[in-house]
Amino acid sequence: MAEPAVTGTWRLVIDTPIGKQHAVLELSTQDGVLRGVAKDDKHGDEIPLTDLALDGDRLTWAQSIRRPMRLNLTFDVTITGDELTGRAKAGRLPSSKVSGHRVTPV
C-alpha cells in the first residue's frame, strides 16, 4: 500500500485539560523530505515541527509551544484521506485527543 499524501494545510483541534486549542499544520516536501510547521493563529506563533515521520498512515512529530504555557508536545495521529485523529502528549500531563481535517492539499 502506498503512503498517503499528507502534504497541505490542516486545521487541528486539540482537546486539552484547559480547553480546546486550535492550530494550523502546514506539511510540505522538499527534496523528498517531509517538512512542517504549526501555526497558532490566536497568538501568531509559528513553530517548526521536529522528528516528523510518516509510516504508512501514521504521522508523528514533536514541537515546542510557548503559549498558553511552555510545553514540549509529541503527536501521534492516523491519516485517513483528508481527516486525521490521534493523541498529543505533553510531558507528564494526560494525553489529549487530536482531530483535524485538510483544508488545502499541496
Image (cartoon, rainbow, N blue to C red):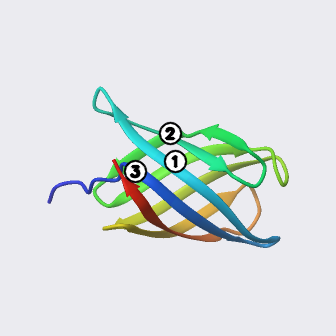
The residue to which callout 2 is attached is 51
The amino acid sitting under disc 2 is: Asp
Please tell me whether mark 2 sits on a helix, a strand or a loop.
strand
The residue to which callout 1 is attached is 61
Direction from residue 8 to residue 96 in the image, left or right:
right
Please tell me whether mark 1 sits on a helix, a strand or a loop.
strand
Q: Toward the viewer: 84 or 102?
A: 102
Q: Residues within 10 Å of mark 1 (few under 14, many from 20)?
A: some
- In three-dimensional space, the C-alpha distance between marks 1 and 2, rounded to whole angstroms, equals 5 Å
The residue to which callout 3 is attached is 8
- In primary-sequence order, the first of circles 1 and 3 is 3
Q: Toward the viewer: 55 or 92?
A: 55
- In three-dimensional space, the C-alpha distance between marks 3 and 2, rounded to whole angstroms, equals 18 Å
The amino acid sitting under disc 3 is: Gly
| Residue farthest toward the top in the current orientation of the protein | 31
Q: Toward the viewer: 87 or 67?
A: 67
Please tell me whether mark 3 sits on a helix, a strand or a loop.
strand
Find residue 97 and report its horizontal and vertical position in percent: 61, 73
Q: Residue visible at 40% across and 66% down?
A: 78
- In primary-sequence order, the first of circles 3 and 2 is 3
Q: Is residue 100 above or below residue 73?
A: below
The amino acid sitting under disc 1 is: Trp
Q: Quadrant of the N terminus?
A: bottom left
Q: Residue visible at 64% across and 39% down?
A: 47
**For discs 1 and 3, the disc positioned in front in the rendered view:** 3
Direction from residue 35 to residue 97 in the image, left or right:
right
